Amino acid sequence: MEEIMSKPVQDQCEDTCNGTSNIDVLKEQMLADQTVTGLTEVFKALGDPTRLKIIYTLLNKELCVHDIAQVLEMGQSAISHQLRYLRNLRIVKRRKVGKTVFYSLDDGHIEQIFVQMLQHVKHD
């Protein structure tokens, strides 16, 4: 038992599994820190149930804050706060008509991400 515990722990494999040239290529292709931070922020935004419900509500139709609040049975202030957060991340966009502000998904990428993940979660 003492022999096992006294052996130094290896923190790497003895031989590179895929060769050092593959490792170098992977390092060169690694995402920039700024890109990783942006992705993290988007995934963090998608980690909130209220924001997911808002995105789902906006999948097929542009709506005003009042209508979103009615659908989600929440206060307009809470919805406005979440919409501002989503807008700052370019997940939703707004369009003003007179005094009314309509919200929709910013682009097809958000819709694709949401629909793909919804299909994944519902997949048996």
Image (cartoon, rainbow, N blue to C red):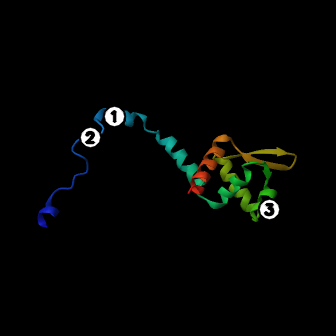
Residue 34 is labelled as none
Quarter of the picture holding the N terminus: bottom left
Label 1 secondary element? helix
Q: Residues within 10 Å of mark 1 (few under 14, many from 20)?
A: few
Task: Classify mark 3: residues with Cα within 10 Å, few (<14), some (14-19) or many (20+).
Answer: few
Answer above or below: position of 1 versus 51.
below
* Residue 108, quarter of the rendered image: top right
In this rendering, position of residue 117 left or right of residue 82:
left
Task: Tell me which amino acid carries mark 3.
Answer: Gln
Which circle, 1 or 3, is nearer the viewer?
A: 1
The residue under the point 49% across, 44% down is 36
Q: Earlier in the sequence, mark 3 or mark 2?
A: 2
Q: Quadrant of the C terminus?
A: bottom right
- Which residue sits at x=43%, y=38%? 30
Q: Secondary structure at mark 2?
A: loop
Q: Are marks 1 and 3 in contact (CB under 8 Å)?
A: no
Instruction: Give amino acid for label 1.
Output: Asn
Farthest residue in the left direction?
A: 3
What residue is disc 1 on? 22
In the image, 101: left or right of 18? right
Q: Residue at x 65, y 56 (%)?
A: 52
Where in the figure is residue 79, as x and y percent of width and height?
73, 59
Label 3 to label 2, Cα distance in Å?
Answer: 58 Å
Q: Which residue is mark 2?
A: 16
* Mark sitting earlier along the chain (2/1): 2
Quarter of the view holding residue 29: top left
Q: Amino acid at mark 2?
A: Thr
